Image (cartoon, rainbow, N blue to C red):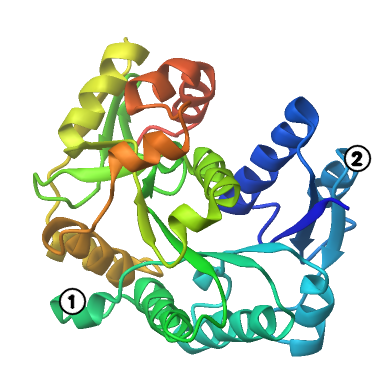
Amino acid sequence: MPKVITVFGATGGQGGGVVSALLKAINSERKGYAVRAITRNPDGAKGQELKSKGCEVVKCDLDDKESVEQAIRDSYGVFLVTNYWEHFSKEKEIEQGKRVIDVCEALGVKHLIYSGLEHVKKLIGIECEHFDSKGIVEEYLNTKKPEGKLNFTIVRFSAYFNNFAGFFKPRRMDKNTFIFDIPMEGAPMDGVEVKQGGECVYGILEEPDSYRYKTIGLSADKFTIQQYCEELTKQLSPMTFKDSQITLDQYRALGFPGAVELGNMFEFYKRGNPDRDIPLTKKLNPGLQEFKEWVQENKEMLSESFDSIEIQSK
């Protein structure tokens, strides 16, 4: 019987990358896996697409223990990612993470791979809820280690390259001038293509004994914002990209929902010394793209995304 791998957030970036890596292995190497894709909307376009590719698509409510049990039952492995931005609740995300861990333990899951993050409040004294919630869940998961109740690995993603054309999309000053407001204040920031992290998760599943109880920080490159801008400018000319050099305090004062939360995240990136391991990430995913390679492959998508930005009024 194939090993069932249950993937939460299967229609999102991280989970979608895990599903893609598993399907690639199943189709090209005839690996003995089966994919159970967890989503809130199995009947949606993305859910139906996964079904057409051979996934078992299952609806799950992370706030309902019985629903979680039904989703996980008979699974060999589980990939768990939770989404703070759905509800902006640290407490809810902690409850969801602990609930899945408890169910995995009770149902005898052989290996849980949890997408965690650091406990920022504990490390540098400022609150960053979407990190802290995952950090607290990590701490809970690590209590399972001494007694061997649940085999697990923790992965921590760095900033997504994809966000340069999405969440952190620049301001457009004129036809070809773009300004990024990313408050790293000259410090370098790790980055990775979100879906390529899925290959790393697959690599862990292939060698579970090598990565049992380990925490792995995923990164493909580490540049300053200006260096990221220079690479974009080089490859997308005549478009030019610049770092606005916005400060952390200026960013937190922008007033949009999540401005303070994200500002605190960038402060952690700047002075919290996040532990990301580029060589290990490349070992887990030999096809990992550095930023230069990623831009090269995604020129058309990036150009279209930036070209859709309206010019900022004077």
In the image, 169: left or right of 144? left
Q: Which is nearer the eye, 208 or 228?
A: 208
The answer for how far apart the CA atoms under marks 2 and 1 are is: 45 Å
Q: Quarter-wise, where is residue 163 in the image?
A: top left
Say what amino acid the circle numbered 1 marks.
Leu
Above or below 252: residue 43 = above
Can you give x and y, in whole percent of width and height, for residue 87 in the image? 56, 77
First-in-chain label (2 vs 1)? 2
**Is mark 2 in CB contact (under 8 Å) with mark 1?**
no
Image mark count: 2
Residue 41 visible (yes or no): yes
Residue at 40% over, 35% down: 283
Residue at 88% over, 53% down: 1
Can you give x and y, in whole percent of width and height, for residue 28 in the image? 75, 25
Above or below 193: residue 269 = below
Residue at 65% over, 68% down: 110
- Secondary structure under badge 2? helix
Can you give x and y, in whole percent of width and height, for residue 10 in the image? 70, 54
Residue 314 visible (yes or no): no
Above or below 116: residue 104 = below
In the image, 287: left or right of 235? right
- What residue is pinned by disc 2? 52
Which disc number belongs to residue 123? 1
Q: Quadrant of the C terminus?
A: top left
Say what amino acid the circle numbered 2 marks.
Ser
Can you give x and y, in whole percent of width and height, for residue 248 in the image? 15, 61
Q: Quarter-wise, where is residue 151 in the image?
A: bottom right
Above or below 32: residue 79 = below
